[in-house]
């Protein structure tokens, strides 16, 4: 870990990820709790997550094109400036009682999320520009580890913070985080990518999106990876907060506190898995495809185990065990994409992947929530396990994906 963090450019990018993830997640959680405190309405509180999710598939096509068209360092800086201005705006919109109106909360969250649609692909696409192919696994492990740690911290601290600290002071703290992130991003020194040809320069945004889509469809690794993840986000719909809460209460006789323990167990497993991926660096570089395939199989059987949990403590234990294979596979997927996709197409590949995943996840989550009104909640999770195994079958039968390797010469 010390060796990769001694790379000054990667360390600057890592700090940017740290600060922006903490700022975004912490403010999202505090606004979510604030809306619930004001309204007491589950529906209006759920609106905060809709505001957070919608921009990803509305702006996905444009985001990928612009990330590939402009300097990615400048994209990072401009998006963090936008987020800083949005938080300043939320501070100015605070009501007399120190709260932010429900609709203002929705708009601020949608704006922060819209900025993230551009920021995240730009940050991930920068990694292969500043890290050697041999260090991609280690770099992605560190990025994922800090993201999961901060997600866990945000869930643990955010709910308490909005009750103990006035929203105006929280907003000032978030402003500081984004301000420092802008300074860290400005320290990045990345070589300019090769000049685009005249035909590429003359492309409209729509033509550039179509060119990126065609590139993705013809790529032997990016295409099956994207298909696999899109299919897999159908069963991912069983892991929404609402369905997991129903499972804890109806299937296990637990309460909201135990639901929180279950979520924390999963994040803890992801953190462990992130560091395990770093330790497995050589194996992940040599056989990333096989690791991706067999973790897909494992997730299917773990879902069956979760559905069969006799009590909350078994469910928490299974939730923890989910974390490491998901983390290891996420690192392998990012390293494989960064090592095989042309750098001038990488932003579009990442943005398209995010767009498809979000569309499928929202539809699937709503479908399974509707289905749970007619079937026992354990049955919903058994259905999810079957669907995960369908994804695994696709992965196992795709030879280019199964036999893919990460080598300096593959890019």
Image (tube, helix red, strand yellow):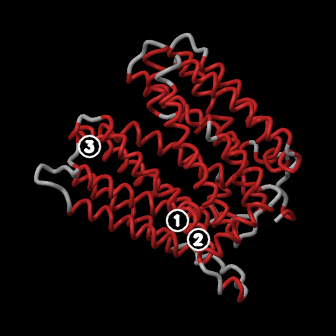
Q: Position of residue 36 (x, y in %)?
A: 27, 38
Quickly name the residue at label 1: 118
Q: Is residue 159 rendered to the left or right of residue 309?
A: left
Query: Quarter of the image holding residue 339?
Result: bottom right
- Please tell me how crowded label 1 is: few (under 14), some (14-19), or many (20+) other residues with Cα within 10 Å: many
Q: Are marks 2 and 1 in contact (CB under 8 Å)?
A: yes
Which residue has dot 3 on it?
34
Q: Residue 359 at what x, y percent from top left? A: 55, 49
Tell me how far mark 3 sits from mark 2, CA to CA: 33 Å
| Mark 3, secondary structure of its residue | helix
Nearer-N-terminus badge (3/2) = 3
Q: Which residue is mark 2?
A: 67
Specify few, some or many for label 3: CA neighbours under 10 Å numbering under 14, 14-19, or 20 or more: many
Spot occupied by residue 153 in the image (x, y as percentages of width and height): 43, 41
Q: Locate the C terminus and report the quarter of the image it occupies.
A: bottom right
The correct choice, above or below, for 252 with respect to 15 in the image is above
Q: Callout 2 environment at 10 Å: few (<14), some (14 to 19), or many (20+)?
A: many
State which quadrant residue 192 falls in: bottom right
Residue ID at (65%, 76%): 207
For marks 2 and 1 on the same chain, the one whose residue lies earlier in the sequence: 2
């Amino acid at each position: 870990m010390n060796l990769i963090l001694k790379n000054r450019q990667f360390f600057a990018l890592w700090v940017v990820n740290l600060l922006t993830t903490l700022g975004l997640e912490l403010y999202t959680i505090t606004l979510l709790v604030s809306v619930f405190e004001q309204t007491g309405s589950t529906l209006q509180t759920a609106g905060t997550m809709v505001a957070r999710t919608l921009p990803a598939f509305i702006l996905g096509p444009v985001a990928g094109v612009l990330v590939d068209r402009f300097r990615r360092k400048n994209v990072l800086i401009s998006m963090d400036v936008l987020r800083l201005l949005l938080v300043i705006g939320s501070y100015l919109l605070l009501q007399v009682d120190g709260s932010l109106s429900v609709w203002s909360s929705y708009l601020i969250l949608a704006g922060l999320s819209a900025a993230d649609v551009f920021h995240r692909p730009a940050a991930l696409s920068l990694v292969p520009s500043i890290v050697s192919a041999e260090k991609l696994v280690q770099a992605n492990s560190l990025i994922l580890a800090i993201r999961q740690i901060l997600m866990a911290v945000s869930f643990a601290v955010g709910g308490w913070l909005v009750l103990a600290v006035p929203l105006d002071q929280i907003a000032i703290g978030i402003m500081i985080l984004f301000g420092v992130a802008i300074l860290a991003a400005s320290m990045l020194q990345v070589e300019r990518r090769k000049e685009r040809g005249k035909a590429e320069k003359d492309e409209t945004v729509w033509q550039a999106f179509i060119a990126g889509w065609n590139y993705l469809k013809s790529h032997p690794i990016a295409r099956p990876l994207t298909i696999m993840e899109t299919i897999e986000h159908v069963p991912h719909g069983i892991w929404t907060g609402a369905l997991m809460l129903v499972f804890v209460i109806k299937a296990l006789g637990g309460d909201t506190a135990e639901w929180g323990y279950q979520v924390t167990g999963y994040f803890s497993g992801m953190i462990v898995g992130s560091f395990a991926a770093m330790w497995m660096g050589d194996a992940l570089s040599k056989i990333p495809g096989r690791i991706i395939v067999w973790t897909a199989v494992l997730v299917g059987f773990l879902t069956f185990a979760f559905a069969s949990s006799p009590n909350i403590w078994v469910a928490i234990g299974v939730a923890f065990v989910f974390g490491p294979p998901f983390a290891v596979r996420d690192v392998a997927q990012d390293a494989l994409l960064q090592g095989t996709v042309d750098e001038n197409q990488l932003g579009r590949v990442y943005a398209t992947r995010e767009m498809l995943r979000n569309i499928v996840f929202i539809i699937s989550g709503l479908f399974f929530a509707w289905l749970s009104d007619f079937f026992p909640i354990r049955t919903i999770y058994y259905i999810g396990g079957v669907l995960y195994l369908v994804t695994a079958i696709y992965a196992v039968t795709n030879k280019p994906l199964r036999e893919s390797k990460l080598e300096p010469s593959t890019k």
